[in-house]
Amino acid sequence: MEQTIMNNLGFPILSTLIFLPVAGAALLLLISRSNENLIKWFSLIVSIAAFIISIPLFAEFNKSTHLMQFTEKHAWIPSLNINYHLGIDGISVLFVLLSTLITILCVLISWNSIKAKTKEFYISILIMEGAMIGVFCSLDFMLFYLFWEAMLIPMYLLIGVWGGTNRIYAAVKFFLFTLVGSVLMLVGIIVLYYQAGGTFDILELTTKTYPYKLQLWLFWAFFAAFAVKVPMFPVHTWLPDAHTEAPTAGSVILAAVLIKMGAYGFIRFSLPLFPDASKAMTPAMLTLSVIAIIYGAVICLAQTDLKRLIAYSSVSHMGFVTLGIFALNLQGMEGGILQMINHGVVTGALFLSVGMIYDRTHTRQIADYGGVASVMPVYASIFMVFTLASIGLPATNGFIGEFLIILGGFKANQWAGVLAATGIIIGAGYMLWLYQRVFFMETNQKVAGLADINLREIITLLPMIILVFWIGVYPNAFLGFMHESVKHLLERVNSGGMHEAGIAKNILEIIK
Amino acid sequence: MTNLTGFIMPDLGPVMPEIVMTCLALLILLSELVIKRKETIAFFSIVSVAIVTYLLAGSTGTTFNGMFIADGYSLFFKLIFMLNVILTVLISVKYIVIEKVNFGEYYSLILFSTLGMMLMASAGDLITLYLGLELMALSTYVLAGFLRHDIKSNEAAMKYFLLGSFASAFLLYGISMIYGLTGTTDLHAISSYISQKGLSGNPVLTLSMIMFAVAFSFKIAAVPFHMWAPDVYEGAPTSVTAFMSVGPKAAGFAVLGRVFLTAFGAARIEWTGILIPIAILTMAVGNIAAISQTNIKRMLAYSSIAHAGYILLGIIAGTSEGMASVLNYLFIYAFMNIGAFAVVIMLRSEGFKGDNISDYEGLAKTHPLAAALMLVFMFSLTGIPPTAGFMGKFYLFMSAVSAGYTWLAVTAVIFSAISAYFYLRIVMYMYMKEPKTAVQLSASPGIALALAITVIAVLLIGVFPSKVISVARIAAGF
């Protein structure tokens, strides 16, 4: 049994983070549905409160250990040895913070754009927040699965009720794809439980060794769940539909947090649980990642729909993330985790931005835009920041992540590194071309006379702009969180891999 | 207490709840003559159930020379039956007025049927089992045809009766064969005879087990003996459908578990060979046929067929863990299924049938609370956490994996994912479509109470399943 560092903040911070939004959602039930302003303000206050509560995680986090921190443990179903066990380490801490931040932005962006069933909307958003944080904090497999699946309900509703014209198709597709993947993992979890002698405790499970053949089976069972969520090629097809049809807040949550869970699952579960299988499957994973990078990027070039283009760019960007993870070295892994945060920030921001202009024009067709820069100059410059961050320009966060990943990828397999780099080139192509078509050229009739973004919208985007440059200029503020955890994980994966981790550290020193 | 003929008065302690239940059911039947307000009778039947439940707690033991067993196992099932009666009565009160069949017999029939189920759960002998099963079945036939002027209800009763009698015949055939083989109808005696004589693999034994499997499959609506279910579920009064989908199914599982695990315990390899194909077929047909239904009662019928398939996994596991998961699931199933039917019943109002899936269009807009409740029940039936349905399925799959049937668990989860499609369709109609017709809800205090109980149970057990699971484990003999 591994040691953990108990939570000593004086209150159960992780439980509070999970259940404060859920309690907020429950209280929303009591508010009359005609009082929309109160509903909105209440949700905003709850989400801001959750964010403020999450700040100690950032400030008090002990970066010098890989151990789980802020842990809480209570018996939940004693007869089956299932515990309510929470804790975070360097890999998960940033995602918790990202979730609390994103929720505030989602409430803000929906302020005027959600008009029907307002109450249900904010209930869904808040429940979503609780479940997302729960996924990142769970140290018991059963608890993890509970949050993992519980997320489907609010997300299904977010897409299906407040989405675009083709929303029902997208919602059902999203639900079925994720559910099929998840239930296969569920059986995998149960098999693991008996194999390990009756425990769901993740820390305990990850210290045991399993027969190679079983590892292979379980690796693929878990792959089914995580690959769908990421989404990896070829199970990515739900993503463009869901992203495109979801309301802005839904797209943002999907892009920023939800699809990160797949990659997080690979790091947290697949790698430490099945190290031998993971190593054996590296070529397959790298191949799928590279296909996703290039395929996603090329498809982007053909898109005529703003949101769909950004959705496919997610496929490409998440390809980088999985490439970094399965490079199985320090740079790749850290780059992968950082790129997950980066992608959350940048793509989340892009969806927010697109949502803002959609609220004004109610069209997502790129052809309906043109010359927006002359009508909405502030908006155009902010959008430029995110475009460049998405491309990976130095001094923005995208650069750091992609650079580390390609470095790691190159080390693992030269071809993977080279091919992934072409993805960046195509990425620059489709993003700049998109920018050109929307913001420059002749002013389209449909955008003439649009009001520039207002203060609420600028406030919504401001945290994202800060993060883009903060991570871009001083990445160590964030990489510092994960060093120890990633190192420890790689030691477990590359058994006897102390040497490897040592080299990786040296190279990282050189980069700095 | 011995008299001249050597008759020994059996210990009536263990069977006291059944005796009281019989008396009360008869009283309620008679009270129909004097009581004009039928709501009073409904109230009395709930009081009767409360009395019986109270008595259940204090009566354990074996009596009538082992023909009647009151143990943890039967107690757990009886609690499910009591719950079933209470919830059914609560949702019936207003509904049978709307259907214009507000007769007191309705309630006494429900009690008699439940009495049959109680006997089945306690059967230590094939004769007791048969008696209980027939009492349950006959009462339910009448209930299914309770809408005398409705042709569909008549058809349902007729179909149920004919096919039910056929199943009973199979059961009798199986009993007579096992009697011919072992010379006894006592479950424990059969068990020891089979293991002592090494009869496992005997063709007559196998044939008789097939007969039992057929008869019980009929009761739990397992494929290919499920044909009656959709028609009967659709035709019967909705409250009776709710009752039937839980009570007789649970009773079927009670005897299935008792007979196969106790009497045929030594021949486990043979009967798992019979039950595994039935389980797979049941999950497949139930879930796939449900997709194309347009009537919600038919859809829920196929759904209840599919659920029988999942529950069979626990029996196939053949362990105490498996049995505990069956008990746990049936308990949870009672809440979520009756909850769903309670919403269906609410849509039935004067001159409006409300049992088409399209009637649910836009319900979230016109009746947000009812829609939210239905949403919870649909997600629970799908098995999505944090609802009780997930915990139930999870424990079932766990028991199957622990018994070495991982591939069966994989099959089950795949079908369970398929089932999401048709449960979600209801949610989709309620939340993602605009209302076409103004649906009137016929709410009543009874339904409100039933919905409150069921939805709280579904969410509470979903988050805190520990208590139910540990009680189920004790009942299953841990």
Image (cartoon, coloured by chain):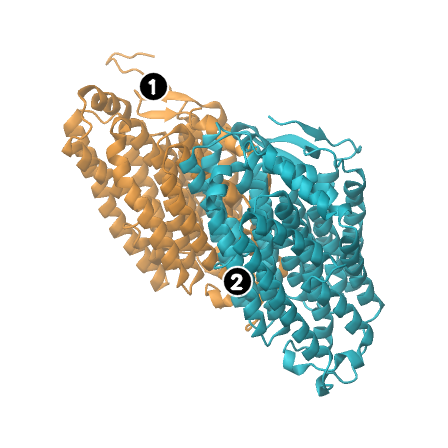
**Mark 1 or mark 2, whichever is nearer to me:** 2
Residue A352 in sight from this viewpoint: no
| Residue B293 placement (x, y as % from top left) | 40, 63
Circle 2 residues within 10 Å: few <14, some 14–19, many ≥20: many
Residue nearer the viewer, A62 or B201: A62
Q: Which chain does orange denote in the image?
A: B
Horizontal side of residue B348 vs A512, given as left or right: left
| Discs 1 and 2 lie in a common subunit | no
Residue nearer the viewer, B130 or B25: B130
Q: Quadrant of residue A454?
A: bottom right
Circle 1 residues within 10 Å: few <14, some 14–19, many ≥20: few
Tell me which residue sits at (53%, 43%) in the image: B388
Marking on residue A238:
2
* Amino acid at circle 2: Trp
Marking on residue B10:
1
Tell me which residue sits at (34%, 64%) in the image: B151
Q: How many marks?
A: 2
Tell me which residue sits at (19%, 23%) in the image: B198
Residue nearer the viewer, A507 or A488: A507
In the figure, the shade used to draw chain A is: cyan
Kindly identify which chain the residue marked by label 2 belongs to.
Answer: A
Please tell me whether residue A34 is drawn above or below residue B415 in the rendered image: below
Q: Which SS class for mark 2?
A: helix
Q: Which SS class for mark 1?
A: loop
Q: CA distance from mark 1 to mark 2?
A: 67 Å
Q: In what quadrant of the picture does the N terminus of chain B appear?
A: top left
Q: Quadrant of residue A201?
A: top right
| Residue A169 placement (x, y as % from top left) | 52, 67
Residue nearer the viewer, B262 or A438: A438
* Amino acid at circle 1: Pro
| Residue A271 placement (x, y as % from top left) | 54, 41
* Label pair 1/2, CB-CB below 8 angstroms: no
